[in-house]
C-alpha cells in the first residue's frame, strides 16, 4: 500500500469512529421525551407498563432499545403503534430514550 492510500484509510477510520461517538446520550432529555411520548404505555420509568401487553423497557440494554427504535422507524420491525411513534424521533431522541430506559431499575421480581 502506498503512503497516500494508508493516510486516506486512516483518515476514513478516524472519521467513522468520530461519527459513531458523535451522538452522546442525554438521560434528562430522554426522560423529557418519555414524559411526552412513552409514559402513556410504558410508564414513566419503563418498569410499570399500563397493560401487560406492553413490554417493560427499564434495565434493557441501550443498544437493544436504540436498534428496536431505529427498526420501528425504518419499518424493519413491524408494529403500527410503535412505528408511528418512532417516525417522530430523531437519532438523538433514540439515543436519549435508550440511555434513559437502560438506566432505570428493571425491578425483575415484579416480572414473575
Image (cartoon, rainbow, N blue to C red):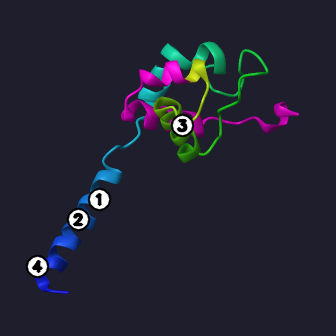
Up-down relation of residue 73 to residue 37 (above or below): below
Marks 2,1: beta carbons within 8 A? yes
Seen from the viewer's position, the closer of residues 51 and 105 is 51
Tell me if residue 70 is in the magenta stretch. Answer: no
Residue for badge 3: 76
Mark 4 and mark 2 lie on one chain; the one further toward the N terminus is 4
Residue on which the image places disc 1? 16
Of the two numbered discs 2 and 3 on the same chain, state the one appearing first in sequence. Answer: 2
Residue located at (70% from left, 30% from top): 56
Magenta residues (range): 83-112
**Secondary structure of the magenta portion, mostly?**
helix
- Badge 1 element: helix
Label 4 neighbourhood size at 10 Å, few (<14), some (14-19), many (20+)?
few
Residue 34 visible (yes or no):
no
Counting from the top left corner in percent of width and height, residue 69 is at 52, 33
Sequence order check, earlier mark of 3 and 1 = 1
Which residue corresponds to the image point at 51% horizontal and 16% vertical from the top-left? 37
Disc 3 element: loop
**Disc 4 target residue:** 4
Amino acid at each position: 500500500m502506498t503512503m497516500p492510500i494508508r493516510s486516506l484509510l486512516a483518515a476514513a477510520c478516524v472519521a467513522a469512529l468520530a461519527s459513531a461517538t458523535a451522538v452522546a446520550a442525554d438521560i434528562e432529555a430522554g426522560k423529557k421525551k418519555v414524559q411526552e411520548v412513552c409514559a402513556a404505555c410504558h410508564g414513566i420509568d419503563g418498569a410499570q407498563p399500563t397493560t401487560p401487553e406492553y413490554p417493560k423497557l427499564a434495565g434493557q440494554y441501550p443498544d437493544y432499545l436504540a436498534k428496536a427504535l431505529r427498526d420501528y422507524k425504518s419499518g424493519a420491525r413491524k408494529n403500527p403503534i410503535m412505528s408511528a411513534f418512532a417516525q417522530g424521533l430523531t437519532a438523538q431522541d433514540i439515543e436519549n430514550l435508550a440511555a434513559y430506559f437502560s438506566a432505570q431499575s428493571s425491578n425483575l421480581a415484579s416480572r414473575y
